[in-house]
Structure formats: C-alpha cells, structure tokens
Image: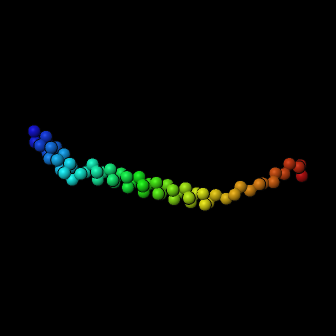
Amino acid sequence: MEKMLRLEQLLANLERHQTKEHVKNAVKEWLLASRSVIDSVIDTIEEEKEAPVARKINISDE
C-alpha cells in the first residue's frame, strides 16, 4: 500500500512540474544537436572529396 502512495506522489510531482514537457524539450534539443553534428560531418566529408582524376592505363607490353 505504501508503494502505491509513493507512486501517486511521484505521478503528482511529475504532473506538477510538467516533466513530460521537459522531457519532450530535452529530446528535441538532443535531436537538433545530433542533426547539427551530422551536418558538420557531412560538410567535412564533402570538403575532403577531391575531384576525380583520370588515370592513364598502359596497355602495351613494354
């Protein structure tokens, strides 16, 4: 019975402090930060790419 009372208190506190909204905002911030890091990595990879260079292939028996 005591566990039920504690659970009720916990749920009441969560509701009072709008924990659900805080969690949603935290997840949103985490996703935005992750997207920023991914965009940065993509930009770095694209900058490191070099233009393809044609290579001469020697087909003679020399």
Query: For this view, does 28 lie left or right of residue 42?
Result: left
In the orientation shown, which residue stands out farthest toward the left?
A: 1
Expressed as whole percent of the image width and height from the top left, the position of residue 50 reads 67, 59
In which quadrant is the N terminus drawn? top left
Residue in front for this viewpoint, 4 or 12: 12
Q: Nearer the viewer, residue 23 or 2?
A: 23
Q: Please tell me whether residue 59 is drawn above or below residue 41 in the rendered image.
A: above
User: What residue is shown at x 64% (from left), y 58% (from top)?
Assistant: 49
Residue at the image point whose x is 74% and y is 56% from the top? 53
Residue 56, given in percent of the width and then of the height, sits at 81, 54
Q: Is residue 60 visible in the rendered structure shown here?
A: yes
Residue 10 visible somewhere in the drawing: no
Going by the image, does 20 lie left or right of 1?
Answer: right
Residue sitting at x 20%, y 48%: 15
Query: Residue pushed farthest top?
Result: 1
Residue visible at 42% across and 57% down in the picture: 33
Residue 52 in the image: x percent, y percent? 71, 55
- Horizontal arrangement in the rendering, residue 36 relative to residue 6 (left or right): right
